[in-house]
Image: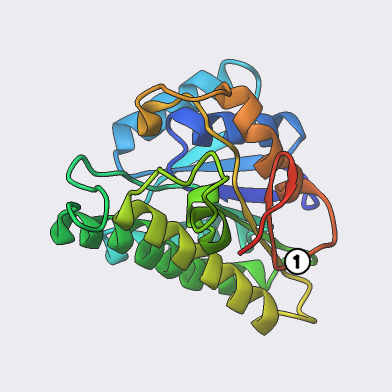
Amino acid sequence: MPNDTRIALVTGANKGIGLEIARQIAQAGVHVIIGARNSDRGKAAVANLASQGLAVQSVLIDLNDHASITGAAQTIRAEHGRLDILINNAGIVDPQDGPPTQGAPAAARRIVDTNFVGTLAVTQAMLPLLRQAPNARIVNLSSALGSLAVMGDPTSPYYSARLIGYNASKAAVNMLTVQLAAELQGTGIIVNSVAPGYVKTDLTGHNGFMTAEEGARLPVQYALSGEETGRFVEPAGGLPW
């Protein structure tokens, strides 16, 4: 592999929008590391993309297992020495989540532990590798449901989507984006929150308005190009925090 080939890690990339993000980034000539919490599923995703002539590999990484996060960072350092792109895509929903009056606190804890704390842990573990790249990029997969302004707007189509655990987890991811972008100013590392839209995947019960291919386009765009940092965007443009 040429030394100037960019290296990307996409968490939760063995299926859904993560797999499609991995595919599109690899099609742009990036060497993609598919992060998966199940090694067999990760290998299956690699076989899928490799059959299309794409440069991919997989690494075991479970956002709830910090030893696996450390191990993934060590593997990437040993094999590549740096990371150019981190896409924090992995996330969960929980059937016991719901409106604030009904959502199970235990479900909220599970969701926040994965979607926010896990994302924070991955980001911290990968930052030393990102600092080794000339111009690194972090894309945090968020959601319009994580916007306090959107969720407080009775005219918003998302106003009634009350999932206290999930929505709070994405608001927390947005806080990570805001603070990390400010902290990393001047380092050459760009950080943004990207809401892909309502995509038909396992996460949404295959409800939604967009295919995984369509939903992957904006995260891929921010992973590959642009100089803006600390933004929260959706396909239609900027989103309010």
How is this picture coloured? rainbow
**Residue 76 image position (x, y, % from top left):** 52, 57
Q: Nearer the viewer, residue 154 or 39?
A: 154
Q: Tag 1, which secondary structure? A: loop
Regarding residue 5, the answer to whether it shows in the image is no
Q: Considering depth in this image, is 71 or 22 the residue closer to the camera?
A: 22
Residue farthest right in this picture: 227
Which residue type does callout 1 highlight? Thr
Relative to 182, residue 12 above or below? above
Residue 145 visible to an observer of this rendering: yes
Quarter of image, res 240: bottom right
Which residue does the numbered mark 1 point to in the structure image? 229
Looking at the picture, how far across and down is residue 142, in whole percent? 53, 52
Q: Quadrant of residue 139?
A: bottom right
Residue found 50% across the figure and 58% down from its top: 152
Q: Is residue 158 left or right of residue 86?
A: left
Quarter of the figure with the C terminus: bottom right
Q: How many marks?
A: 1
Name the residue: 29% across, 39% down: 38
182, above or below 55, in the image: below
Label 1: few (<14), some (14–19) or many (≥20) C-alpha neighbours in 10 Å: many
Residue at 65% across / 26% down in the picture? Answer: 214
Q: Is residue 127 left or right of residue 64?
A: right
Task: State which quarter of the image contains the N terminus.
Answer: top right
Residue 94: quarter of image: top left
Does residue 223 lie above or below 137 as drawn?
above
The reply, left or right, for residue 43 in relation to residue 187 is: left
Q: Residue at x 35, y 48 (%)?
A: 162
Q: Is residue 8 found left or right of 28 in the rendered image? A: left
Q: Position of residue 105 (x, y in %)?
A: 16, 61
Nearer-the-camera pick, 97 or 68: 97
Q: Position of residue 98 (x, y in %)?
A: 25, 47
